[in-house]
């Protein structure tokens, strides 16, 4: 059973005025079978946490630790983190012209597993996953995310999640830009993954609407680079009713 453990994580980013600290001591443990939701206002550091876990070069870890099953994540390259079992669904998935969805997925699966999947089985798996995500089979031959709508990009992210089957999934505002139908499809995909029972999910969102479909075990309020409060699913309902005002006032 896998565990992602974040301890006293401090992260800064370079600006025109010099380094600026974004994360100011984050403690978080995500165990297999758990879904954690992080909620907070814009600019609170939620996405910085996601990208720091994944190894984005823009962010500099200045203190603390991140481990996956005891292994030092921060010492790993980005591809090593993926092979170790970490997955990031990006808020703004990038286009990759000239690389087909089929080739991208099979190359990623081969890199993670250390061997290429059997072609006949793999094609069947991809087609089944695309059907579950309500994606037209024609998308398999298109370039990754090129010309995709916002909803199509997000569904493709969850398609990757299903096929690559990581130990821990970090989902950065997967609900942004989705209409209600796409939100339901994406949520169903996340629930299928989480429903395996031995996978961890870190879901970053502004709004409670996705939490109507994906039920978190824990909710964390993120303000000014720290976790300001933690609770169960009822905390999300409280945030929906009251907003982040009291946390922002406490920070001031």
Image (cartoon, rainbow, N blue to C red):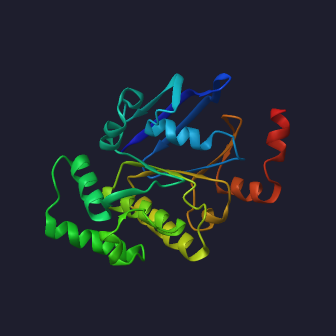
Residue at 62% over, 67% down = 212
Query: Taking 13 as reference, is 33 above or below it?
Result: below
Viewer-proximal residue, 198 or 115?
A: 115
Give the image location of residue 192, x and y in percent: 42, 66
Quadrant containing the C terminus in the rendered view: top right
Answer with the quarter of the image where residue 99 lies: bottom left
Give the image location of residue 103, x and y in percent: 25, 60
Answer with the quarter of the image where residue 26 lies: top right
Side of 23 relative to 96 (left or right): right
Side of 45 relative to 127 (left or right): right
Q: Is residue 151 visible?
A: yes
Q: Is residue 191 visible?
A: no
Side of 57 relative to 75 (left or right): right
Give the image location of residue 208, x and y in percent: 67, 61
Quadrant containing the N terminus in the rendered view: top left
Query: Taking 211 as reference, is 21 above or below it?
Result: above
Query: Taking 147 as reference, is 20 above or below it?
Result: above
Give the image location of residue 68, x and y in percent: 39, 36
Viewer-proximal residue, 49 or 97?
A: 97
């Amino acid at each position: 059973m896998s565990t992602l453990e974040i301890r006293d994580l401090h992260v800064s980013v370079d600006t025109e005025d010099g380094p600026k600290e974004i994360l100011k001591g984050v403690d978080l443990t995500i165990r297999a079978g758990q879904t954690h939701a992080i909620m907070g206002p814009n600019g609170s550091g939620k996405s910085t946490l996601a990208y720091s876990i994944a190894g984005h070069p823009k962010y500099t870890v200045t203190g603390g630790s991140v481990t996956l099953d005891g292994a030092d994540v921060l010492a790993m390259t980005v591809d090593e983190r993926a092979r170790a079992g970490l997955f990031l669904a990006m808020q703004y998935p990038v286009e990759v012209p000239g690389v087909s969805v089929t080739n991208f997925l099979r190359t990623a699966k081969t890199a993670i597993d250390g061997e290429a999947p059997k072609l006949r089985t793999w094609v069947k798996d991809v087609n089944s996953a695309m059907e579950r995500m309500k994606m037209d089979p024609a998308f398999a031959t298109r370039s990754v995310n090129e010309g995709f709508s916002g909803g199509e990009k997000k569904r493709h992210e969850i398609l990757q999640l299903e096929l690559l089957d990581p130990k821990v999934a970090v989902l950065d505002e997967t609900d942004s830009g989705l209409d209600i139908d796409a939100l339901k499809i994406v949520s169903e995909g996340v629930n299928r993954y989480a429903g395996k029972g031995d996978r961890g999910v870190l879901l970053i969102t502004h709004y409670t609407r996705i939490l109507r479909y994906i039920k978190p075990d824990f909710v964390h309020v993120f303000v000014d680079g720290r976790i300001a409060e933690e609770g169960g699913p009822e905390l999300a309902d409280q945030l929906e009713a009251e907003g982040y005002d009291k946390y922002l006032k406490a920070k001031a």
